[in-house]
Image (spheres, rainbow, N blue to C red):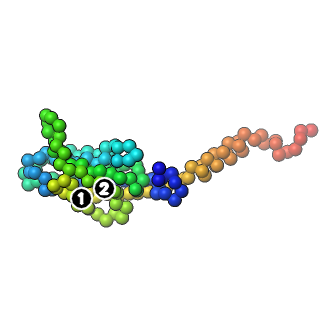
């Protein structure tokens, strides 16, 4: 709703790159989920699951999503199980970084997710201007060319 208000943030494309996870149990087959929370909860991206004896997993997986810069996201870390449900290792709230400040270490449960994010605003014509232009062009196209010539003789 904020993006529809005058002066509100414009829409654009958020880019998330999951760089790595660390400090999770070495036996865990770890993967990361990125979810948009509002207006409707939606999974933006899910990494492949990896197991590492050291507990550090490198991903380098990138996801993009159309949203506004104030959209709230949740980072979930889970342990994959072939049979049965996956274990929830933690979650954390996250907002896209508009400053392109590089990698950010985010505490998620007992471990850390290193994430890089950016936001690029898309330049869109305001609906009011496009409606007016469309309205005028239709009206001009419907007007007969002889309407300015005066009454017929």
Residue 89, position in %: x, y? 17, 48
Label number found at residue 133: none
Estimate how packed mark 2 is, as few (under 14), some (14 to 19) or many (20 or more) residues with alpha carbons within 10 Å.
Answer: some
Percent coordinates x, y for residue 88 in the rendering: 19, 45
- Asked if marks 2 and 1 touch (Cβ < 8 Å), the reply is yes
Left or right relative to 53: residue 113: right
Dividing the picture into quadrants, the one containing residue 58 is bottom left
**Spatial distance from mark 2 to mark 1, Cα to Cα?**
9 Å
User: Dot 1 corresponds to which residue?
Assistant: 106
Front residue of 44/139: it is 44
Residue displayed at 14% across by 39% down:
81
Residue 43 can be seen, yes or no: yes
Residue 56: x percent and y percent?
Answer: 13, 55
* Residue under pointer 2: 94
Say what secondary structure mark 1 lies in. Answer: strand
Asked which secondary structure carries label 2, the reply is strand
Q: Is residue 1 left or right of residue 98?
A: right
- The structure residue drawn at horizontal position 31% and vertical position 47%, both measured from the top left corner, is 35
* Front-lying residue, 50 or 72: 72
Among numbered discs 2 and 1, the one appearing first in the sequence = 2
Above or below residue 77? Residue 8 is below
> Is residue 56 among the parts visible in the rendering?
no
């Amino acid at each position: 709703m904020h993006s529809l208000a005058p002066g509100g943030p414009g829409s654009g494309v958020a880019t998330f790159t999951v760089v790595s996870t660390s400090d999770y149990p070495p036996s865990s087959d770890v993967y990361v989920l990125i979810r948009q929370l509002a207006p409707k909860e939606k999974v933006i991206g899910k990494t492949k699951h990896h197991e590492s004896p050291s507990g550090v997993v490198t991903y380098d997986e990138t996801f993009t999503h159309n949203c506004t810069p104030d959209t709230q996201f949740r980072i979930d870390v889970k342990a994959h199980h072939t049979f049965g449900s996956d274990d929830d290792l933690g979650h954390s709230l996250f907002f896209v970084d508009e400053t392109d400040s590089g990698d950010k270490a985010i505490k998620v449960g007992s471990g850390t997710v290193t994430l890089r994010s950016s936001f690029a605003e898309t330049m869109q014509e305001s609906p009011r201007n496009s409606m007016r232009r469309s309205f005028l062009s239709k009206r001009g196209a419907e007007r007969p060319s002889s309407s300015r010539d005066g009454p017929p003789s």
